[in-house]
Amino acid sequence: MRFLPLVLKHLRRSWIRSLSTVMALALCIFLFCTLQTFLAAVDASLASANAARLVTRNKVSLVFNLPQSYEDRIAALPGVKRVARVNWFGGARRAGDFSEFFPNLAVEAEPYLEMYPELTITPEERRAFIEDMRGCIIGPDTATRFGWKVGDTFQLESFIPPYRVGRPFEFVISAIYKPDEARYPGTDRTAMYFHHRYLYETTGRRIGVGTYAIEVDNPDAAGTVSRAVDTLFANSDAETHTETEQAFRASFVSMAGNLALLLNTIGMAVTFTILLVTANTMSMAVRERRTEMGVLKTIGFSSGRVMGLVLSEAAVIGACGGLFGLLLSQGLIRVLPHLPVIGPFVQGLSGFGLSPFLAVSGLGLALFIALVAGLVPGLLAYRARITDLLRQV
Amino acid sequence: MAIVQVSKVRKVYRRDTQEITVLDGMDLEVPEGEFVALMGPSGSGKTTLLNLIAGIDRPTSGSVQVAGTDLATLSEGALARWRSRNVGFIFQFYNLIPVLTALENVELPLLLERLSRRERRKRALTALEVVGLSDRAQHYPRQLSGGQEQRVAIARAVVSDPKVLVADEPTGDLDARSAEEILTLMETLNREFRKTIVMVTHDPRAAERAHVKRHLDKGVLRAD
């Protein structure tokens, strides 16, 4: 610790260079933590998918609905246990204002709740929800966010044209579900579910079904059932594409597999670039101070101690860069759900937040980069003979 | 009794395939409390001899004993520790650390000792008082004149109370008046604080202040 003031004073000597190196490292850690947080949230979302659940959508695109009549035909297929209609409502408290957006879906209540035991509510709450056409259940994070409690009412207006009926939809909170993180990790804590029937009736019975949620008897038969569903509607006006819930979610988050590769590649490239930049900066700092290092060795600093000073400077830069990067990352992660366009998508990712593990990893990465960058100049300072260092005078 | 004893020292530098003999069988004894001036033309080996005495270089052959220690027996780490306790080095260009104040520069060798911050400060201030610069303790090197910088460098050299001071042309970068002040200070350190001083100089007036003048030529001591 007694050498710390010396280290800090050396860093202040070229403060613009030190600051720019810290900023470069901060950028690296910011990207690392933010991208990894995003990927972790996507992974958690995918992991929460149930192997016994399938999703059937229009083969052309999610934008196009499927006929209501498909439900009974799917339910009649061997291996199918339940079917439920699901429509993404896309409602906001103020039309077009997504700053307070949260995922909201119209679902066929009874089979849906059977299929999704992770939406834990009491039998009384369930009864209240099913009996009230305007009833809904909401996630605990959304309830906390808006200060809502059971019995409260609120309004939502969709941005999707067929669901725009000239007035907002009014809802009554029947229940706030309690996710069981131990049994169902990654369960979304922000979503809202209301009656598909309410949407259907209010829109004049003209809408189709966005997706069908299917529960199969045996998860091992999921592939067979998927093919059976798609074969059933082959060559029809609305051909279907059926996949596992996990595959559906993965495709929904822009093909998460490729996304992870892309983001990790970007992260690696940035990290390597910053490593080179930091190494170059550290080398410059050491080259400029050859005589001073010679003086330090002359007055009794051992080679190891001089190398330690170089590495300490690198570590201070790494720690500052790492902490600043963490702050930037934490800031963006907090703001991201409130941004237009990407905000609603991020809100749909359960547990989107900088984890302590990632924060420590980010800080560790910053220190690692800085120390690796400082290693070569540190070794040069270690090995240099005093007479050679002083000859620079 | 000799505090510096150089016996049959050879120092050979190798440049590519060429060997350059800088010191060739050098013998030198410096009694404790002596003030010795080493003189000679450029390339005569003065600075090399000084570096060997200060323990910042090693001879190719022969032995260098300073303050009772044969420097050849010490590892690099032990030699560094030995330097911090036994030798103070005064450079021609002062070589103060520009980002540190005068006080912090003087305090630098004390960072290697197990001393409290208060004790380090106290000793560094005492050293600055000895060189007459206690009022400039918080000044940075750029705020000092050349003569003042060299006095701070001398304070740094004596702060850990070494037995031997080695000075490589300590007045070489100073005007005549500052040079006089530095030489007077070195005389004081020699006379009042009993420091043994080995000084390399080209300046005959500086050499006049020493008790003994030794002349080097082509790596050997010339008889006076």
Image (cartoon, coloured by chain):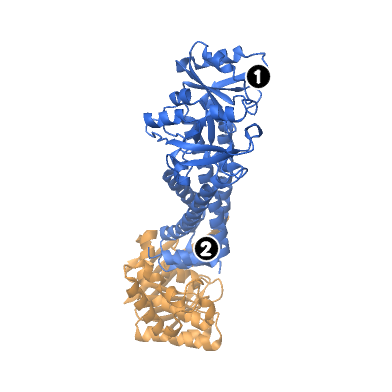
**Mark 2 residue crowding within 10 angstroms, few (<14) / some (14–19) / many (20+):** few
Mark 1 element type: loop
Question: In which quadrant will I find the N terminus of chain A?
Answer: bottom left
Closest to the camera, between mark 1 and mark 2, is 1
Callout 1: chain: A
Instruction: Judge by depth and name the residue closer to the eye, B94 or A279.
Output: A279
**Amino acid identity at mark 2:** Asp
- In blue, which chain? A
In this view, the residue farthest toward the top is A78
| Residue bearing mark 2 | A388
Q: Are marks 1 and 2 on the same chain?
A: yes
**Spatial CA span between label 1 and label 2:** 81 Å
Question: In which quadrant will I find the C terminus of chain A?
Answer: bottom right
**Amino acid identity at mark 1:** Ala
Up-down: is B14 above or below B90? above
Sequence-first tag of 1 and 2: 1
Residue B127 image position (x, y, % from top left): 38, 80
Instruction: Judge by depth and name the residue closer to the eye, A177 or B203.
Output: A177
| Residue bearing mark 1 | A238
Residue A245 image position (x, y, % from top left): 52, 25
Q: Tell me which residue sits at (54%, 42%) in the image.
A: A35
- In orange, which chain? B
Instruction: Judge by depth and name the residue closer to the eye, B141 or B160.
Output: B141
Up-down: is B30 above or below A32? below
Mark 2 element type: helix
Residue B4 image position (x, y, % from top left): 37, 73
Q: Tell me which residue sits at (51%, 55%) in the image.
A: A377
Callout 2: chain: A
